[in-house]
Amino acid sequence: MNTTTRTILRDTMQFIGVGLAVTVIGLIIGAVVVSPAVSHQQRLLGIAALFGIAAVVLAARLVIRALRTRPTRTTRQARQAPAPSITLRGGKSSRTPRAVAALAAAGANPTEIAWKTGLPVDAVSMLLEISGARTAALVG
């Protein structure tokens, strides 16, 4: 399944879910909370049902967000890979252009370099472009 099909399917499911939620909540509010023929206990049950639905929706959204932000296999491998040891003169930080060039020379790709140095990927790409190590990093 390609990305476009997934996007269309996801949007359709969200639209159907929102429609069902609005319908159910509207029915509960209309039939239980607003109707004068409903007893006090039934109104309290209706209000509890509304809060229950809200809790289920919130929990589902949190679970979906957690599933979407799971690290990919590449990210997990990059995190588990040992960072090459970089010893800089003068005790400088590893966030320097020399450190980026050294990681590129060691065969790390720009994404790994960004993760290991804590720099944004754009900054790493710029440093690699300036140092001339970009082609080596992209090939590696």
Image (cartoon, rainbow, N blue to C red):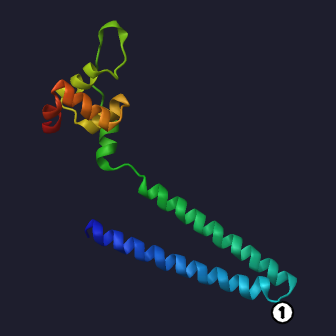
Q: Residue 41, located in which quarter of the rendered image?
A: bottom right
Compared with 53, 92 (above or below) is above
Q: How many marks?
A: 1
Residue 20 seen anywhere in this rendered image of the structure:
yes
Q: Residue 123: image x %, image y %?
A: 31, 32
Name the outermost residue toward the bottom.
Answer: 37
Please report the residue visible at 54 percent of the width from the left and 59 percent of the height from the top. 62
Identified by mark 1, the residue type is Ala
**Left or right placement of residue 23 versus residue 136 in this view:** right
- Dividing the image into 4 quarters, which one contains the C terminus? top left
Residue holding disc 1: 37
Residue pictured at 30% horizontal, 38% vertical = 78
Dividing the picture into quarters, in which one does residue 102 lie? top left
In the rendered image, the quadrant that contains the N terminus is bottom left
Taking the image as shown, residue 29 lies to the left or right of residue 24, namely: right
Please tell me whether residue 75 is drawn above or below residue 117 in the rendered image. below
